[in-house]
Image (tube, rainbow, N blue to C red):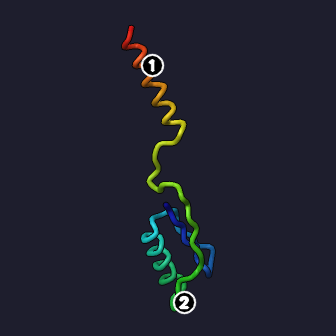
Amino acid sequence: MAYRFWCGECGFKTPWLAESEGAQRQLEHYTKQHPGIPAGGHVETNRKNPEGGLGCLQVAGILVLLLIIAAACQR
């Protein structure tokens, strides 16, 4: 899962990151931009894998390629 942290004081938001890294960046933002104010805002979650991965179209393409190779080997 990936997380995006939004600042409660301005329009700042982190990119999609792991939870600990996003929280750290939000804390750094508050320290620099809003000193003395406790970190606030909200957190957005994305259930997709932040590392990416193969999508359905890519998997289907690989399967078609394997079928073509298998058919060519049988000739």
Q: Is residue 61 left or right of residue 70?
A: right
The secondary structure type at the circle numbered 2 is: loop
Q: Position of residue 15 (x, y in %)?
A: 52, 64
Q: Which residue is mark 2?
A: 37
Q: Residues within 10 Å of mark 2 (few under 14, many from 20)?
A: few
**Residue displayed at 44% across by 53% down:** 51
**Residue displayed at 36% across by 14% down:** 73
The secondary structure type at the circle numbered 1 is: helix
Of callouts 2 and 1, the N-terminal one: 2
Q: Quadrant of residue 71?
A: top left
**Residue displayed at 47% across by 50% down:** 52
Mark sitting on residue 8: none
Q: Amino acid at mark 1?
A: Ile
Toward the left, the furthest residue is 73
Q: Which residue is mark 1?
A: 68
User: Where does the C terminus fall, quadrant-wise?
Assistant: top left
Q: Amino acid at mark 2?
A: Ile
